[in-house]
Amino acid sequence: MFSPGADSAHDAGGVGVSSVGTTVPARFIWPYGGNRVFVSGSFTRWSEHLQMSPVEGCPSVFQATCSLSPGIYQYKFFVDGEWRHDEHQPTISGEYGIVNTLYLTREFNNQINSVLSPSTPGTRMNMDVDNENFQRVVTLLDGNIQDGHLRVSEAAIQISRSRVIGYLSSHTGYDLLPDSGKVIALDINLPVKQSFHILHEQGIPVAPLWDSFRGQFVGLLSPLDFILILKELETHGSNLTEEQLETHTISAWKEAKRQTYGRNDGQGRPQQPLVHATPYESLRDIALKILQNGISTVPIIYSSSSDGSFPQLLHLASLSGILKCICRYFKNSTGNLPILNQPVCTIPLGSWVPKIGDPNRRPLAILRRTASLSSALNLLVQAGVSSIPIVDENDSLVDTYSRSDITALAKDKVYTHVRLEEMAIQQALQLGQDANTPFGHFNGQRCQMCLRSDPLLKVMERLANPGVRRVFIVEAGSKRVEGIISLSDIFKFLLSL
């Protein structure tokens, strides 16, 4: 497969030094960021790593050069302890998995040298680069991908969408049902305070509501309800005594909510009957119900009667559960979905930090850990998001505050003796950590982070875990938030909504 000179660099006793015939400088480029980046390949017999250096003026671009004889080479990048390949360069599947290939000729070298200044004689990693021309050669944008200079091909997107939609259309709600488990429903005559204690103790964010008089499931109790109740108590605390809180039922709260917020749900969206699905509906239809109604959960309800009587609650369907099915189905055949191995920064999805002077993008909803809990709750409601990234004084991501975290205040009746304006977010988060609830935790990490260079599959797999609603794209090293990708972002992209 390789030319006679393919291994000559290693045979000469040093990486990048050839003893056979004419050699030309080969330049390897990794344009997707990282802390420590190496390149290794057939020219080192895969036994040595050649360290790459950041390009001056382009800190997310790494490059290295070595002298090789003309020929065909295979190589991969070792980025922060993980083997990677560049999807935008030629690849093949070989003994070391998917690897990049380089066909090195003297003509290729002359073409590159017309744009890139040659390296200093006798060195392998010293190269003066004209940034504008460099970016044109490697099709690179050092900055926000939303500028559109570096994008995955439209053909790859359409092929991937078609196959995902085909899968979702041919599988049903039955595929979401676990082999074993439990589902919890709450009677509408249960006191609100007791209900949130149950949610907190069970580590669940939401529960269907059962009306025993009508014999039907009539709604959902969610963290948003608790947030609105706390805001009411903060504003009109004297109107409700502790005894009244003990007896105030879910039904009474829902009626009060209708009177207070009229025809909307507290976020400006129209109130509606319970949105549910049957186990016979396709995963695509279930996902569309979640997205189109702006909700996080759809109960899977089965009834053997044509009039829907005697309903059975089978499962609570969510986008994360559907995404888990997608990842499991396509993980070992990523070639069927060309976009899975693409860096997320090359795919048009998610929300990104706007560039200076860009009037068309809203800033990301971010709070410092010293901000008040009241400001976090207001932002969750007003922005209509499930979680907010929390940063320190250096704007480094340290945690996330989610709607479901509000149930931690139910522990020891904390909500009865705190003022939302006076409690800092970091204090509220500490309550959740002390509570040790499983919801929202994945491998012991509350805050799911990825780099802009990470493949889409990695982001999807993290979002597919229960309790994870958003993945934060951070800058390597500083952990400053560069973007946010949510479950709804993924599905709107895959379903072309």
Image (spheres, helix red, strand yellow):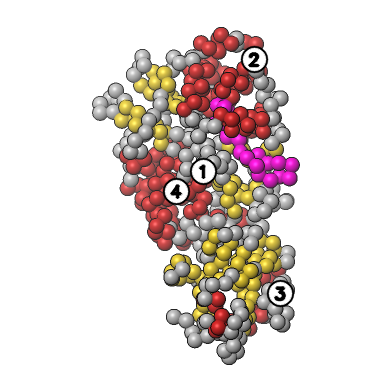
Q: Position of residue 271 (x, y in %)?
A: 49, 26
Foreground residue, 307 or 36?
36
Q: Earlier in the sequence, mark 3 or mark 2?
A: 3
Mark on residue 126? Answer: 3
Mark 4 lies on a secondary structure that is loop
**In this rendering, the label closer to the viewer, 1 or 3:** 1
**Disc nearest the viewer among 3 and 4:** 3
Pick the front one: 151 or 179: 179
Q: Tell me the mark number nearer the camera, choosing from 2 and 1.
A: 1
Q: Which mark is residue 495?
A: 4
Name the residue at 50% across, 38% down: 467
Disc 1: which residue:
443
Magenta stretch contains residue 400: yes
* Circle nearer the N terminus (4, 2): 2
Of residues 175 and 97, the one drawn nearer to the viewer in this rendering? 97
* Quarter where residue 34 is shown: bottom right
- Range of magenta residues: 390-408
Q: Circle 2 is placed at which residue position?
A: 236
